[in-house]
Amino acid sequence: MSGRSTPRPKDRAGSGDGAFARRAKVAILAGVGYLVAFVFIAPYLEMALTALKPDRELTKSPTTLLPEHWDFANFVNVWKAAPIWKNMQVSLIVAAVATLIALAVALPAAYYTARHRFRGRGAFLLLVLVTQMFAPTALVIGIYREMVALDLTDTLFGLILVNAAFNLPFCVWILHGYFSSIPKALEEAAYLDGAGKVKALVRVTLPLSLPGLVTAVIYTFIGAWNEYVVALTITSSPDRQPLTVAVPGFVTSYQQHWQYLFATSLIAIVPVVILFVFIERYLIGGLTAGSVK
Amino acid sequence: MTTTTAEPGTVAPVKQKNKSDVQGSGRLAAVLLSPTFLVLALVVGYPIIDALRESMYQRSNGLDANGFVVKGDKFVGLKNYTDILTGDASHAFWNAFYNTTFFTVVGVLIETILGVAMALVMHQAFRGRGFVRASILVPWAIPTAVSALLWRWVFQADGVANAMIGHQVLWTTEGFHAKVAVLIADTWKTAPFVGLLVLAGLQLIPAEVYEAAKVDGAGTWYTFRKITLPLIKPVLLVAVLFRLLDVLRFFDLPFVLIGAHKDSVETLSMLAYDEASNLRYGPAAAYATILFVYVAVVAYAFVKLLGADIIGEARSRKKTAAKRAKKGPRAAREATA
């Protein structure tokens, strides 16, 4: 806000102080922002530094922050140590397709429940929410049996279906919230201009709820990208497992390749960062552009 | 744009339109809602029913003389439940119940406060904002299983955490420090989630509202309490609700970071998993069902106490708020035109 507002000559009494105070406020906020960002990033630095340590330095005590010998080869060798490329493909495909399915399924339901009042509307939303209350560790037995019955164990489709369903309730709820907060009058104005229902939805409501849509996309994608228990249960071949199942395999009671674990984890962050960088401006853009006026 | 003044002539047609809407759209409702229904029934509904059925059974005999698993499930009614609540296992259950509650209350409180604070900072315009946003949100994108390993590395005996505080704490052994380790790791991972949602909510607040408040001479704290908080409330409630549901089912983080069978961090979800991995599906399902009831009660209480309007009534209130917010600039524009 402070950065965008044009300086006004007489904001309050003592206008010179006001401008100074505002600049100081921005500086302090930025400082706090950087500090918080550093705290959140610090564990990655540790991760990156450890990923560059050779085997023998990992067990050294006391530990050194920086590697004594920078072993960049770890990032190359890790591709040979496990079928990482395959795992990454599985994770990407599952997350992307699950996101598409969850959105496609949630959108109509969320829109309809937000725009229409009908008997059982509250019950429907509650029922959707209730499915979020069962622990995945408990569902896993039933899901496994089902996957065996449908012959979907060890398949991408099985993973996609489960992940789409797990994140569906959140999509329905968050989109429902966004659609509800957009005045119906805006759509009605579009009708008056001759737009049909679908056109009003696509041209008016969807752009306005873009931050909500983006939130739903990020949430589902990351949820699917992170899913662990079910993937651990219904996949068995190493080249059909997502990264979440493959990566912890580097540190077990038999072998402790922390450097590979962290190297892979860092590699695995890249797609999510790309997604985020690509999508962030929509999250920010949306309404601040001033479309709701 | 409908006018707020209740004029009989304008209200009547609107009402009629709504009525015909309800009558004609039963089929439309079915078409639009059934995919959600179908997917959830398939992936979540069936396993829930399966678990409920399973919780009434006990495995009567494990292995036969040749070491093969004999399938013989015996109907035991509610015995699995009574065993958990009052039998030998009750100590483990109540301990896990306490841990789950502790992580939920303390964790969600910290994450919410931190998340809102982070969103407020991320919402401000300053140089490097994009970088700050990205770096805060990326922890959320690391698989929990991996971030738990990362924190295990940080919290190991001669790890970075101990090097920083300057003396030896055995974080991953029994004791309160294990809870602290789990809370730190969980906050690092999930406060960004709350932050992201609240940030999205902040985008919905028109800048004019703040400018109006400023003109009226409202202070920062007052503006936050009276304008920001009420306007982000719907989004914040959804975020907190989903965090509650998530942390009540807490599993992978304490499981990987500290490990199974540790009284300090064992949660209900871990107990259920432990039983299932020992092929005692009956008790596992019973734990899961009790956990479900607990989650449902908390969610219900949350919705009733804080946001009975999460589902519906918020709309009318928010609408009027939005209208009120819009009136200012609109009137100003009309005046200049």
Image (tube, coloured by chain):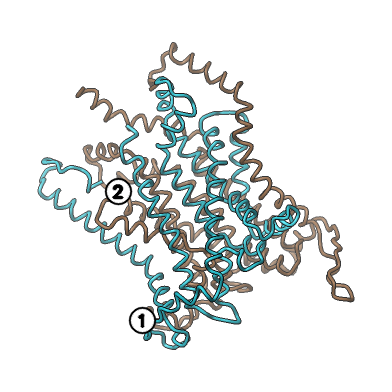
Chain colours: A cyan, B brown
Total marks drawn?
2
Amino acid type indicated by mark 2: Trp
Indicate the position of residue B289 as horizontal and vertical percent values.
69, 55
Which label lies toward us, 1 or 2?
Answer: 1
Q: Nearer the viewer, residue A257 or B309?
A: A257
Quadrant hosting residue A156: bottom right
Element under label 2?
helix
Q: Give the residue displayed 49% in from the left and 26% down from the top.
A: A197
Q: Give the residue displayed 58% in from the left and 50% down from the top.
A: A164
List the single residue furthest toward the right: B65
Q: Quadrant of the N terminus of chain B?
A: top left
Residues at marks 1 and 2, CA–CA distance in whole angstroms: 43 Å
Above-or-below relation of B46 to B25: below
Image-based side of A42 in relation to B172, left or right = left
Above-or-below relation of B114 to A62: above
Element under label 1?
loop
Above-or-below relation of A263 to B32: below
Q: Nearer the viewer, residue B135 or B157?
A: B135
Q: Which of A275 and B188 is in front in this view?
A: A275
Q: Give the residue displayed 30% in from the left and 45% down from the top.
A: B222
Image-based side of A265 in relation to B118, left or right = right
Indicate the position of residue A210 as horizontal and vertical percent values.
42, 41
Amino acid type indicated by mark 1: Leu
Residues tagged 1 and 2 counted as in contact (Cβ below 8 A): no
Indicate the position of residue B330 as horizontal and vertical percent values.
28, 27
Using a 10 Å C-alpha cutoff, classify the residue at mark 1 as few (fewer than 14 neighbours), some (14 to 19) or many (20 or more). Answer: some
On residue A185, the disc is none
Q: Which chain is disc 2 placed on?
A: B
Indicate the position of residue B200 as horizontal and vertical percent values.
40, 46
Quadrant hosting residue B324: top left
The residue carrying mark 2 is B221
The residue carrying mark 1 is A66
